[in-house]
Amino acid sequence: MKKAALFLFIAVATTTLYSCGNSEPKNEGNPFTTEDVKGTTTAAAANGEAIYKRVCASCHMAGGDGIANVYPPLAKSDYLANRENTIKQVIKGSSGEMVVNGKTYNNAMPPQQLNDDEVAAVLTYVYTSMGNSGAPVTAAEVAAVRAKG
């Protein structure tokens, strides 16, 4: 009986330790990169949704509605029309006034510490949900904006 209990304890402990790894997204071996999706956004958007919940939702809210007079909405957002500015906003951050859907916001957004695949995935999620109808963003687009400095 003691051996069975010890075996059960070791099995549970091993499973628990194995499943409690770092939950941060990694680029190496990540099956959810936008480059792998090739025309479909299901996997990229799913990964993007997870990134959005972790990085963006605290300011822009879970549904992308933002907070009136503080953080602009991403849902049904006219700001997304300029893809380069949108990508730049995520990778470089910004401060000062911006107009979104006819309303002025004056706040700061820090640059997000995301790699090109992660930026592409989160923006693909934003562009293809929340009442938006934009095309998926690729890691190549993000890299091009990042290279411009």
Image (tube, helix red, strand yellow):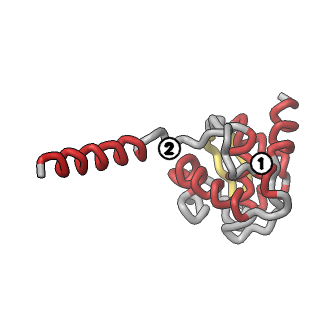
**66 to 20, vertically: above or below:** below
Quick one: SS at disc 2? loop
Number of marks: 2
Quick one: SS at disc 1? helix
For residue 23, which numbered disc appears in the image?
2
Asked whether 139 or 11 is in front, the reply is 11
Q: Is residue 108 visible?
A: no
Taking the spot 77% from the left edge, 56% from the top edge, the residue there is: 79
Residue that mark 1 sits on: 86
**Hey, which residue is sitting farthest bottom in the picture?**
131
**98 to 114, vertically: above or below:** below
- What residue type is disc 1 on? Thr
Asked whether 133 or 37 is in front, the reply is 37
For residue 55, which numbered disc appears in the image?
none
- Check the picture and name the quadrant holding the C terminus: top right
Query: Horizontal and vertical percent for residue 105?
Result: 65, 50
Crowding near the residue tagged with mark 2, few <14, some 14–19, many ≥20 C-alpha atoms within 10 Å:
few
Taking the spot 81% from the left edge, 33% from the top edge, the residue there is: 146
Q: Upstream in the sequence, badge 1 or badge 2? A: 2
- What residue type is disc 2 on? Ser
For residue 8, side relative to residue 149 (left or right): left
